[in-house]
Amino acid sequence: MGLREQKRERTRRQIADTAWTLIADQGFGQVTVAAIARAAEVSEATVFNYFATKEDLFLFRLDEYGERLVRGVTDRPAGEGVAAAFRRLLLDQGGLVEQLDSGDRQALDRLRTVNRVVAESPALRAREQISLTRTAELLAAALGGDTAEERLTARVVAHALIGVQRALVFEVRDAVLAGEIPAGFAERLRRSVTGAVALLEQGFGAYGS
């Protein structure tokens, strides 16, 4: 990445981090793009150069994570099936959920904040589903196929796998909002991922290996 690209990426993250902090403190509906621009010390036009909507600002990390999943599956080692690669990537993500087991209070606070803000905003919930669907379509395109039948199969496989991620999002949100984050919660989620992907593998097995 060149210097110009690095500068653009820093600006993008500065804007997104500023938006996240303001929205977490005040609520999604109470924060305007103009307020985000002022706090980030950029113009509104600059904000919209990087993010098309306010929803994009708050959920850009989910979009990025989806893109990393797709790249990871695409770059999987020779002989590894798509389902196996997807399971490995989900289990190796090292994200906020895993940090909960280490007693990281900051991680728990951030997880609660994200889920509270999304749960309270119909616009963010809708945008979240758009992000997950976009990831599934990106994965389907990456799996590809030369015929219509192969492309349909790739799409079915991709949406089934992202369905596991979608279910995990709901599982974590329900637990966080209910205040029920027990010790070993991350390990329980890991077992759930393993079991869910194993169930899918019974259907498409070593597809893509």
Image: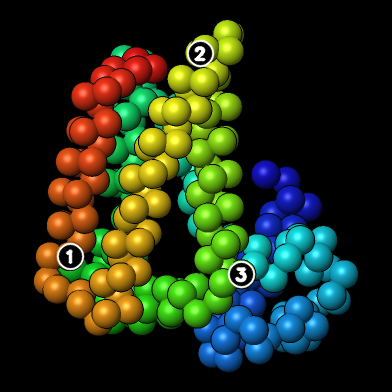
**Left or right, residue 161 beside residue 52:** left
| Real-space Cα separation, disc 1 to disc 3, in angstroms | 28 Å
At 41% from the left and 28% from the top, the residue drawn is 157
| Left or right: where 158 falls relative to 34 | left
**In percent of the image, x 58 and y 13: which residue is there?**
148
**Label drawn at residue 123:** 3
- Label 3: how many Cα within 10 Å (few below 14, some 14–19, many 20+): some
> Label 1 to label 2, Cα distance in Å?
38 Å
| Of callouts 3 and 2, the N-terminal one | 3
Check contact, mark 3 vs mark 2: CB within 8 A.
no
Q: How is the image coloured?
A: rainbow
| Quarter of the view holding residue 44 | bottom right
Residue shown at 36% from the left, 26% from the top: 82
Q: Amino acid at mark 2?
A: Glu
Q: What is the distance, in whole Å, between disc 3 and disc 2 at their CAs?
A: 34 Å
On screen, residue 86 above or below 31: above
Point out which mark residue 185 bears: 1
The label shown at residue 150 is 2
Q: Is residue 132 above or below residue 47?
A: above
Which of marks 2 and 1 precedes in the sequence? 2
Mark identifier at residue 65: none
Left or right, 138 with reference to 161 = right
Work out whether residue 41 or residue 177 is closer to the camera in this orientation and state it. Answer: 177
What amino acid is found at the position of numbered circle 1 in the picture? Phe
Q: Residue at x 64, y 84 (%)?
A: 29
- At which x and y percent is residue 42? 81, 77
- Numbered disc 1: secondary structure: helix
* Quadrant occupied by the N terminus: top right
Q: Is residue 125 above or below residue 146?
A: below
Instruction: Kindly indicate the quadrant of the structure image that contains residue 52.
Output: bottom right
Residue 80 seen in render: no
